[in-house]
Amino acid sequence: MKLFNSVGPNPKVVRMYMAERGIEVDLEEVDLMAGANRQGDYLKLNPGGQLPALELDNGDVIAEITCICEYLDDKDGGTSLIGTTPEERAETRMWMRRIDLGILEPLANGFRYAEGQPIFKDRMTLIPHAASDLKDLAQEKITWLDGLMEGKEFVCGDRFTLADIMLFVFLEFGSQVGQPLNEANKNIGALYERIGSRSSAAA
């Protein structure tokens, strides 16, 4: 297998997941900053143009970070990072969905529509006047999650999961692009520190 890799939070989610699992695949770097992911050769592999993408040994390509990680997890019959029972998998996927839609999407688009304009202005339709509100929505959901984290080690209780990886990577990204952690969210801050101390956080 081969992972088409680049800078940015989405590829890091997959790399961090693989580091937790001890999975090693070939990496092929795609120059996101130069827009290589929006050019013909890469678009033939992934028509969506996003990174990362996983090319399987049979030539099939899987895109979208949750799909890539779930495929790799399914290959081993399921692990605690997503769940080994239907109940655990449902819980993980529920939180992945909430985190993705409530935090990751508005946080990332808040960046794209503001600080990221020079990178994305010729690649997608931007809504600059929405940037501030999107950032506020992301922070609102982070604060909501903070209240639910009282007494919990990880998002799914005592299980470290892909939901934690996704949250950590995008909180880290936010701190690098003008959307820092709110210090009042003590539970999220503690969670961020716990995950950041894992060796996989450097992936």
Image: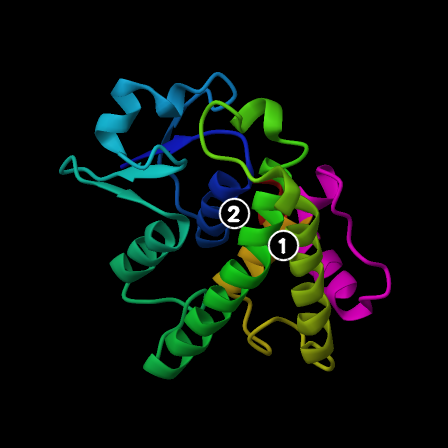
The amino acid type found where label 1 is placed reads: Phe
Residue occupied by mark 2? 16
Residue farthest to the right?
184
Is residue 41 positioned above or below 9 on the image?
A: above
**In the visual, does 154 lie left or right of 150?**
left
* Residue 168 - label: 1
* Residue pictured at 68% horizontal, 79% vertical: 148
The amino acid type found where label 2 is placed reads: Met
* Residue 86 - label: none
Find the magenta span and give its range: 172-196
Total marks shown come to 2
Kindly check if marks 2 and 1 are in contact, taking CB atoms under 8 A apart as contact.
yes
* Residue pictured at 52% horizontal, 47% vertical: 16
Helix, strand or loop for the magenta stretch, by majority: helix
Mark 1 element type:
helix
Quadrant that contains the C terminus: top right
Is residue 97 positioned above or below 104 on the image?
A: below
* Residue pictured at 45% horizontal, 73% vertical: 94
Is residue 34 positioned above or below 92 on the image?
A: above
Query: Between residues 178 and 74, which one lies in front from this camera angle?
Result: 178
**In the visual, does 25 lie left or right of 80?**
left
Query: Between residues 105 and 196, which one lies in front from this camera angle?
Result: 105
* C-alpha gap between disc 2 and disc 1: 10 Å
